[in-house]
Amino acid sequence: MILLAILTVVLLMIVILLAVRLHKRSRQLAYIHQKLGGILEEGTYERLLVFSSDAQIRLLLGDINDLLDYAHRTGARYANQEKEIRNMLSNISHDLKTPLTVVMGYSETLLHSSSLTNQEREGMISKIQDKAQEVLRLIHSFFDLAKLESGDTELALTRINLSELCRVKMLSFYEMLTNQGLQVELSIPESDLFVTGNEDALDRVLDNLITNAMRYGADGKVLGLLLEPTNHGEVMLQIWDKGKGIPEKEQDRVFERMYTLEDSRNRLYHGSGLGLTITKRLVERMGGRIELRSVPYERTSFKISLTSR
């Protein structure tokens, strides 16, 4: 009888302890449910803090907090992309409006003015052509970037003689550079350097960076191209100038989509804000890296690293 009484008391204590534990777990789960409802309703993404000795509850809380952190990061990225898209549409609208306004102005003058000389008419037609080409460049740049970011553009990677490509490219720009009074400093090793890349993409990258340096570094009176191997199985290409440079606080942003800054160097297409972004995407699609270093009136350089082959 005594043994039975002891067993009964023990069982009763076990039942009570289980009931207390279940009640505590129930309260904690109810709290979690309530907090999650508030977080979803208010969109705060705050972390759940429940002090529990229950290993399964702690595991559940850890998973929930990881999901909340992920949702918060995703929401922040989405908000940033929305802002970028709004800025992009605003900038594109502005950049299209400016040349189109000029086109419309000259067109109306040609249509309604009968006193224009042949020379005046030819001059206006030439300006209309220039502005139409500007609009076309902007549209092409926008769709090129859209294709690069969507992954629709396939870049066939082959073995490219980067030394020869750089020589040919600088030769094609040489007359323009000298006409602007720019001294050219070319540093390419005698032995050709080969990389894994796409010739058309590299040609465009060089076009963008050289044009950018000419346009915004001309006051430094020198433009350079440096090509050399590294100790990490890569080839480093650098386009540099000694112009006004880019403020340090802006250097992390120059590759952003539609990044615009008054007096910015990133406006390769008459203010489109797409040139350096396209350059960065092309370099990355070839498995490379691009970085900017700028000290105003000392040296501003865009350095590209590609896999040696």
Image (tube, rainbow, N blue to C red):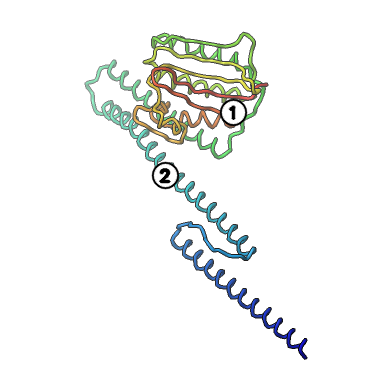
Precedes in sequence: disc 1 or disc 2: 2
Q: In the picture shown, does residue 50 fall above or below 212? A: below
Residue drawn 51% across the image and 13% down it: 170
Quadrant position of residue 219: top left
* SS under mark 1: loop
Residue 198: percent from left, percent from top: 61, 25
Dot 2 crowding, Cα within 10 Å, few <14, some 14–19, many 20+: few
In 3D space, how far apart are the residues under numbered discs 1 and 2 (Cα atoms)?
28 Å
Q: In the picture shown, does residue 95 fall above or below 34? A: above
Quadrant position of residue 263: top left
Q: Quick check: can you spot residue 132? A: no
Looking at the picture, which amino acid does disc 2 mark? Answer: Lys
Dot 1 crowding, Cα within 10 Å, few <14, some 14–19, many 20+: some
Residue 211: percent from left, percent from top: 45, 20
Looking at the picture, which amino acid does disc 1 mark? Answer: Gly
* Disc sitting over residue 288 in the figure: 1
Instruction: Compare residues 21 and 218 and report the one nearer the observer.
Output: 21
Residue 171: percent from left, percent from top: 51, 10
Quadrant position of residue 15: bottom right
Query: Could you tell whether 26 is left or right of 83 in the image?
Result: right
Query: Could you tell whether 288 is left or right of 250 in the image?
Result: right
Identify the residue at the far bottom of this view: 1
Residue 141: percent from left, percent from top: 47, 31
* Disc sitting over residue 36 in the figure: none
Quadrant occupied by the N terminus: bottom right
Q: Please name the residue that numbered disc 2 is placed on.
A: 83
